Structures are given as C-alpha cells and as structure tokens.
Amino acid sequence: AIFFSKFGNGEEFRIIGGRKATTLEFPYQVELEMTYMHMCGGSIISNNFILTAAHCVKSVENYKKYPATVFRLRVGADSTSKGGTIYNVEEVICHEKYREEVPKDEYDIALVKTTEPIKFTDNIKPIELVSKEPSEGDMAYVTGYGREQIMRSGMLANHLMAVELPVVG
C-alpha cells in the first residue's frame, strides 16, 4: 500500500532503485517486528495507532491473526537492528473484509495499537494525510525496509530506504 501524505511518502514491499533515507525525512515510518525480527513497515497515524498491511499480522498457513503480544514496534530508527524507541503492541485490528483469497490486496489494511502513547519528536511524527487525492503522474515516495532486488530471495535492507515514483491510475 502507498499512503499519500503531505510528506509525499508511502511504503511498499520492495524499494528497488531507492536510496538510503532517514526518519527525519520520513518521521512516520515504523518497523513492525514479530518475535524480535523484521516483519513489515507501517505509518504512525496517531499517538497510539500504526497503519500497516493485514497480511503482515495474519498467518499465511491458517489465515488467523497473530496475537498482539508477538509484535513490537520500532519508531524513530533508520535501521532495523538498532536505535529508535520500542513500543509493545496492545491490539491488532484487521479490516473485517480482508481475506486471503483473490484479489489479495483488497482491504489489506490493519491497525496496530500501542500499549502506551508514542512520544513525538523531530523524527517520530504521525503521517500528514493530503487533503486531495493525487493525480496520475504526481510523484510520491515509497519508503520502508523492503527488498532492494527484484528476486523475492533478495536481502532486506537493514536501513530505511526511499524511492520516488509516479502515481499511476
């Protein structure tokens, strides 16, 4: 999913052709960890909620939602392995219409609630949503810790990455 914001940023699974970025540039960027390992990215939307993809918080084997206690959030970090502030997860809420069948990305959205409020700083801020829908050809940023190569087996970036791409209709 790409989230359009006043920052003009978003996130996606692969950051091919991107550059290293910082949370000062993209202060809403969050790393969702599962049992202390990188799982997905997300966007801060308030001091208690992160927006992420539903497929990040549900099992691919039985399609059940993982318990909130297996997740934690790293905010304000440019790296997946160090820095930032860690927040525990109280609750995970998937869109009620999200299902694993085709089309897989329809309703692929989830909220992650923190156990305590996120403290905002220069590099930890909620995403600022735009007031109008972007037009085809507008430029938007895709950010995250995704794969830097086309192959699914490519290594994940351990540093926050960003790439600017045109909006398609």
Image (spheres, grey):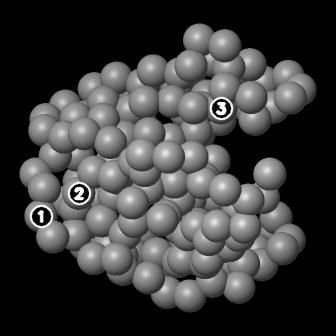
Q: Amino acid at mark 1?
A: Thr
Figure quadrant of residue 98 = top right
Mark 1 neighbour class, 10 Å CA radius: few under 14, some 14 to 19, many 20 or more: few
Number of marks in the rendered image: 3
For the point 15% across and 70% down, the residue is 122
Q: For the residue labelled by badge 1, is the local secondary structure a helix, a strand or a loop?
A: loop
Residue 102 seen: yes
Residue 58, above or below 149 = above
Question: Where residue 169 appears, x then y in whole percent?
Answer: 80, 51
Q: Spatial distance from mark 2 to mark 1, Cα to Cα?
A: 7 Å
Residue 89, above or below 155 = above
Mark 2 neighbour class, 10 Å CA radius: few under 14, some 14 to 19, many 20 or more: many
Circle number at residue 125: 2
Pointer 2 and pointer 1: residues touching (CB < 8 Å)?
yes
Q: For the residue labelled by badge 2, is the local secondary structure a helix, a strand or a loop?
A: loop
Question: Where residue 77 appears, x then y in whole percent?
Answer: 30, 70
